[in-house]
Image (spheres, helix red, strand yellow):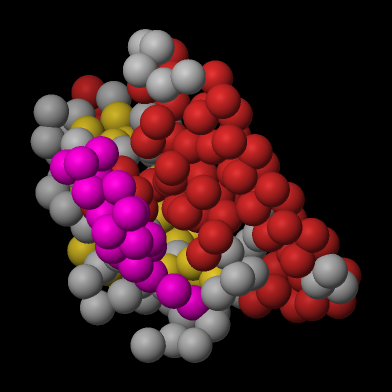
Amino acid sequence: MNNKFFSSNEIYARLSANHPHKMSEIERYTVMRWCAEVQTELLKDPSGLERMVVELGKPHNLMVRIPMAVSKIERVYSRSSGRVIGYNTNGEYIFVSQYDRDTEVMMDCYTFPIDDEGFPMVKIGYEQACEAYCVYKMYHEDFLEGKMNGQQWGDICQTKDWEIGAALRAWDEVDDTFVKEVQNAMVNVGYKKIVRHGSR
């Protein structure tokens, strides 16, 4: 186990222990996506990401599935010619045009390190932020449907905001030199360039 990261699967296990009834409605994949949102959208911390080349294969019904560890797509292109392919995405699939229906698709992207079960890993220190954000996402619909009172929802929101804030303060303490070193490594073509086969 990498001592700088924890698996989003661990957050799923924590939530399952503390919210067993609610977690019967939630998939592991969903928890993974929420943990990824914490690092990439709320904290905007690039230091745990790796630049990779991913082989996606031919589209099925004009779409290819994005591997779950992918955080940011840099470009999508043809495996044979290197031609850049125009696409749309909903975060889970890439959608291509009729013109590219028989094209072997490749993708340059940034990914999280993954554990032995294929779950993305998040930097140590973000555990509480991920757990609090997942609880917030789990109960948001219940609040909107009137299944919980304002005090309960307020407590959930306050905990989420506090934990995200604490993680942001920790990230803010990282100096500019470190950030530049990480970003330089991430754009270096030779940095851990691995070809992986995505779902087809």
Query: Outermost residue, top direction?
Result: 145
Please, is residue 186 above or below residue 141 in the view?
Answer: below
Which x, y percent locates residue 122?
A: 49, 67
Q: Residue at x 70, y 68 (%)?
A: 183
The image quarter containing residue 193 is: bottom left
Residue 11 within the segment the image draws in magenta: yes
Residue 94 within the segment the image draws in magenta: no
Q: Main secondary structure of the magenta part?
A: helix
Viewer-proximal residue among 14 and 67 = 14
Which residues lie in the magenta part?
5-24
The reply, left or right, for residue 66 in relation to residue 173 is: left
The image quarter containing residue 144 is: top left
Please, is residue 21 above or below residue 193 in the view?
Answer: above
Which x, y percent locates residue 59?
A: 17, 39
Q: Residue at x 49, y 88 (%)?
A: 3
The reply, left or right, for residue 121 in relation to residue 72 is: left
Viewer-proximal residue among 58 and 9 = 9
The image quarter containing residue 111 is: bottom left
The reply, left or right, for residue 101 in relation to residue 143 is: left
Viewer-proximal residue among 48 and 131 = 131
Let me know if residue 171 appears in the view. Answer: yes
Let me know if residue 73 appears in the view. Answer: no
Q: Residue at x 13, y 49 (%)?
A: 200
Q: Quadrant of the N terminus?
A: bottom left
